[in-house]
C-alpha cells in the first residue's frame, strides 16, 4: 500500500515519503504550508488513492478536544427524566459519538483529517496526545474503553496561526508543502485543465510568478488562486498574446481579481505598473 | 546507527528528541526509504524537523554529516558578517547620525574599516573596545555605547540563534532561557490570571444542577455567578529608538497579553515615562494622555507592567528636561517613583539580555527605582515577573 499521488493530485517525492511513513508507522502526519497549496485536498486524495474512507473533523476556535471523542447530552436526559421517557434508563442513549470515536470504530482502516488544528485553543493538541498516541480513550459515563480496531491514518493540517506544543510535535511526522516550482506547477495545471492551450499556460505562469515576486505584496497568490484564474481565462477565452502584451495600458493582467485578494495589493500593483509604464514611456 | 547524525543535529540546536530518533529507526527498519539517500533524507527530515524554520539548518547538518561538507560552524562565521553589513545598509540614519559618521571619515571609510575588522576578527566578541560584537564600546556592533558608533541591530532572531551556535555557550537551562514565542508567553502570563466568581448568580451551573437533581429526585436548578478574570493590568511599552529591534518581540507579548486579561490598558512611552503617554503610536504627537490622568483613573489594584530596554542616557531619567524628545518639567525618575508609590505590583520587563544590564547605568537606575523588579524577556524571567505581580502585600 503506497501513496504515489493520484491523477488529480501531483505529489512531490518528499510528500510521498512523508505520507507513506505516516501510513506505515501509524503516526499522525502534520501538514503545514502556505494557504492554498493543497493541504486539505491531500487527505482527500490519499483517501482516494489508498481506497480508505475519509473522516473529516474541522476545527473551529470553539472546538474542544472532548468533542472529538464523545459528548454527554445531559440536558436532553434531564428533560426526558422529567417527562418519564423510557430512554432515560440507558445512559448510552445520551452519549454522542465524536469524529475520533467514529474513526476508531470504523470497519475499514479510515483516514482521519483534523483540519486546521491551529484554530483551536492553545491546549487543544495537548488534550489529544494520549488519544492519538494509544488510539483509545475511556468513556466515564458507561465505563467502557473505546479502542481503535484498526489504527486510522491521521492527517493534521495547520496554518501556523498558533505554535503547536512540543510534546505533540514529537509524535508526528511533519511535512511542509513548499510552493511548487514552475515545472511542478505546469504538471498541476495539466492535471486540472488538460485541454488548456500550453501557450496560455506558460504565459500565465510567467505572469503568475512575476506577480508572486512583487515585493511587499501581502497575500501572495497560491496554487488554488492560479487554478481559478486559469479557469476564468479559459472562460473568457483570453488569448495568450494578451498576457504577453506589455504595452502601456495593459500592465495589469486581465482578471487580476482572481489572483489578488486584497485591496492594498491591487493598489500596490497598480502603482508599480504605473511606475513601470512611466519608465518605459 | 545514526547516533552521530542525531548528535550533530542536537549540537546545531535543532529541537530533536530521542523519541523522534527512535521513530526514524523504526521507519528504517520497515524499509520506507527504499535504500536511497534522497528518500532517507526526506524521511529523516519529516521525522526530525517539526518547524519549517529549522529546515534550512537541518539541510546544512545533513549535508555536513553525510557528505562531509564544511561544518555548520564555519559556515556561520562566514555568513553572519555579511548579514551585519546588509542590515547596516538597510538602516536609515538621521542627519545627526550621518554627521557623526562624517566625523569618522565618512560612510565609506567606516564601511571599509568595518570590513577590515571583520576580516581580522576570527570569532564573535563581546565587550572590549575594538572588536565587533555586542556590549562593547567599539563604534561597530550592536548595543554599543560609543556615540560615534553605528548600531548593527538585528531585527530577526536569526543572528541571535546563530550566535548561540557560535559562542557555544552552555545554557544552564536550555528550555527556560530561550527567547519566547507567543505560545510560551501565553503560558507564562496565564500564571497571573485569577478567576473569581462575583456578581449576580445568573449562569446555569450544569454539573451542580445535575448533582442536586440526582440528590433530591426532582429538577433543582442551581445558578452561579459568571466567572470573571479579576486581573487588571496597565501596560506601558517603550517604543522607538533603541527599542526598534525589540518591537517585534514586544508586539508578540502585546498580542499574547491581550487575550489573557479582561481589564488591560496599554500605553506607549519613549525611553522613560514622563508627564504624558499615548495610545496610538501613529498619532503620538497629537493625542497625548496626561500621565496624571492615568494615575487618577486606574485604581491601585491594577498591576503595572513596563516593557522597555531601559537603555538611555542616565540624564533622561534623573534630570528635568532630560528627555530626548521634549522638555520635561519633572524628571523621569519622579514619574516612575509615583507609579511605584501608587501601585503595589510593578514590574519592568527588559528584552535585553540580563548580562548586559550591569554595563548600562540607566538600567541600574531604573532597576533601583522599581526596587529590583526588572526581569528579562525570557520564559524564566516572565515567570518570575508574573510571580512577583501576583504577590499580595
Image (cartoon, rainbow, N blue to C red):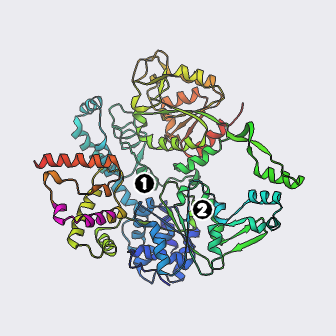
Residue at screen point 48% across, 73% down: A44
Residue furthest out toward the right: B216
Q: Within 10 Å of the Cα at label 2, are there few (<14), some (14-19), or many (20+) other Cα atoms?
A: few
Residue closer to the observer: B307 or A180: A180
Q: Which residue is mark 1?
A: B162
Residue furthest out toward the left: A281
- Relative placement, left or right, of B56 versus B23 is left
Residue closer to the observer: B80 or A261: A261
The answer to whether residue B84 of the structure is visible from this angle is: no
Question: In the figure, residue B384 lies in which quadrant?
Answer: top right
| Location of residue A256 in the rendering, given as x and y in whole percent from the top left corner | 28, 56
Question: In the figure, residue B126 lies in which quadrant?
Answer: top left
Marked residue chain, label 1: B
| Location of residue B74 in the rendering, given as x and y in whole percent from the top left corner | 37, 60
Q: Which element is circle 1 on?
A: helix
Marked residue chain, label 2: A
| Location of residue A3 in the rendering, given as x and y in whole percent from the top left corner | 46, 80
Up-down relation of residue B38 to residue B171 (above or below): below
- Relative placement, left or right, of B46 versus B102 is right
Magenta region: A228-244
Q: CA distance from mark 2 to mark 1?
A: 25 Å
Q: Is residue B331 magenta?
A: no
Q: Within 10 Å of the Cα at label 1, are there few (<14), some (14-19), or many (20+) other Cα atoms?
A: some
| Location of residue B151 in the rendering, given as x and y in whole percent from the top left corner | 36, 39
Question: In the figure, residue B370 lies in which quadrant?
Answer: top right
Residue closer to the observer: A158 or A6: A6
Up-down relation of residue B127 to residue B219 (above or below): above
Q: Which residue is mark 2?
A: A167
Amino acid at each position: 500500500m503506497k501513496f504515489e499521488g493520484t491523477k488529480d493530485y501531483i505529489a512531490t517525492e518528499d510528500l510521498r515519503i512523508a505520507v507513506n511513513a505516516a501510513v506505515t508507522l501509524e503516526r499522525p502526519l502534520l501538514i503545514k504550508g502556505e494557504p492554498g497549496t493543497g493541504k486539505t485536498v491531500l487527505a482527500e486524495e490519499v483517501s482516494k488513492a489508498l481506497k480508505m474512507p475519509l473522516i473529516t473533523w474541522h476545527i473551529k476556535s470553539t472546538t474542544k478536544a472532548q468533542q472529538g471523542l464523545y459528548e454527554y447530552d445531559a440536558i436532553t436526559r434531564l428533560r426526558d427524566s422529567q417527562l418519564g421517557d423510557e430512554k432515560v434508563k440507558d445512559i448510552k442513549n445520551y452519549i454522542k459519538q465524536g469524529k475520533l470515536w467514529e474513526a476508531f470504530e470504523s470497519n475499514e482502516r479510515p483516514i482521519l483529517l483534523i483540519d486546521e488544528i491551529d484554530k483551536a485553543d492553545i491546549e487543544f493538541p495537548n488534550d489529544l496526545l494520549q488519544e492519538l498516541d494509544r488510539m483509545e480513550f475511556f468513556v466515564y459515563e458507561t465505563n467502557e474503553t473505546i479502542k481503535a480496531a484498526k489504527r486510522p491514518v491521521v492527517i493534521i493540517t495547520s496554518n501556523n496561526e498558533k505554535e503547536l506544543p512540543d510534546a505533540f510535535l514529537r509524535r508526528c511526522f511533519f511535512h511542509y508543502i513548499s510552493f511548487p516550482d514552475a515545472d511542478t506547477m505546469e504538471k498541476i495545471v495539466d492535471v486540472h485543465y488538460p485541454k488548456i492551450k500550453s501557450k496560455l499556460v506558460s504565459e500565465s505562469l510567467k505572469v503568475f510568478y512575476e506577480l508572486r515576486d512583487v515585493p511587499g505584496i501581502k497575500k501572495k497568490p497560491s496554487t488554488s488562486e492560479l487554478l481559478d484564474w486559469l479557469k476564468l481565462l479559459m472562460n473568457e477565452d483570453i488569448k495568450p498574446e494578451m498576457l504577453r502584451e506589455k504595452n502601456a495600458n495593459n500592465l495589469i493582467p486581465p482578471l487580476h481579481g482572481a489572483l489578488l485578494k486584497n485591496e492594498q495589493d491591487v493598489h500596490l500593483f497598480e502603482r508599480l505598473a504605473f511606475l513601470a509604464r512611466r519608465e518605459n514611456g | 546507527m545514526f547516533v552521530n547524525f542525531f548528535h550533530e543535529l542536537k549540537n546545531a540546536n535543532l529541537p530533536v528528541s530521542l523519541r523522534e530518533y527512535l521513530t526514524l529507526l523504526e521507519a528504517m527498519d520497515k524499509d520506507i526509504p527504499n535504500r536511497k539517500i534522497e528518500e532517507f533524507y526526506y524521511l529523516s527530515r519529516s521525522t526530525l524537523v517539526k518547524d519549517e524554520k529549522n529546515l534550512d539548518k537541518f539541510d546544512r547538518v545533513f549535508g555536513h554529516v553525510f557528505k562531509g561538507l564544511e561544518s555548520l560552524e564555519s559556515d556561520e562565521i562566514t555568513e553572519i558578517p555579511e548579514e551585519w553589513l546588509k542590515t547596516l545598509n538597510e538602516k536609515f540614519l538621521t542627519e545627526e547620525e550621518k554627521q557623526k559618521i562624517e566625523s569618522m571619515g565618512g560612510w565609506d571609510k567606516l564601511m571599509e574599516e568595518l570590513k577590515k575588522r571583520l576580516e581580522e576578527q576570527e570569532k564573535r566578541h563581546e565587550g572590549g573596545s575594538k572588536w565587533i560584537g555586542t556590549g562593547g564600546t567599539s563604534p561597530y556592533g550592536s548595543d554599543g555605547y560609543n556615540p560615534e558608533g553605528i548600531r548593527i541591530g538585528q531585527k530577526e532572531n536569526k543572528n541571535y540563534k546563530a550566535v548561540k551556535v557560535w559562542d557555544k555557550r552552555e545554557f544552564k537551562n536550555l528550555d527556560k532561557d530561550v527567547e519566547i514565542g507567543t505560545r510560551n508567553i501565553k503560558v507564562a502570563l496565564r500564571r497571573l490570571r485569577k478567576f473569581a466568581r462575583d456578581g449576580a448568580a445568573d449562569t446555569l451551573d450544569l454539573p451542580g444542577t445535575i448533582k442536586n437533581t440526582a440528590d433530591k429526585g426532582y429538577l433543582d436548578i442551581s445558578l452561579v455567578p459568571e466567572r470573571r478574570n479579576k486581573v487588571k493590568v496597565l501596560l506601558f511599552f517603550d517604543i522607538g529608538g533603541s527599542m526598534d529591534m525589540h518591537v517585534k518581540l514586544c508586539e508578540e507579548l502585546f498580542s499574547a497579553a491581550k487575550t489573557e486579561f479582561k481589564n488591560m490598558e496599554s500605553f506607549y512611552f519613549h525611553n522613560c515615562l514622563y508627564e504624558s503617554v499615548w495610545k496610538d503610536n501613529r498619532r503620538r504627537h497629537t493625542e497625548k494622555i496626561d500621565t496624571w490622568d492615568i494615575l487618577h483613573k486606574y485604581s491601585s489594584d491594577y498591576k503595572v507592567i513596563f516593557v522597555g530596554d531601559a537603555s538611555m542616557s542616565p540624564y533622561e531619567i534623573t534630570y528635568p528636561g532630560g528627555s530626548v524628545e521634549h522638555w520635561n518639567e519633572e524628571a523621569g525618575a519622579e514619574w516612575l517613583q509615583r507609579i511605584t508609590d501608587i501601585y503595589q505590583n510593578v514590574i519592568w520587563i527588559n528584552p535585553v539580555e540580563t548580562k548586559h544590564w550591569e554595563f548600562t547605568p540607566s538600567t541600574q537606575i531604573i532597576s533601583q527605582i522599581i526596587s529590583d523588579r526588572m526581569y528579562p524577556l525570557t520564559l524564566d524571567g516572565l515567570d518570575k515577573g508574573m510571580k512577583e505581580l501576583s504577590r499580595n502585600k
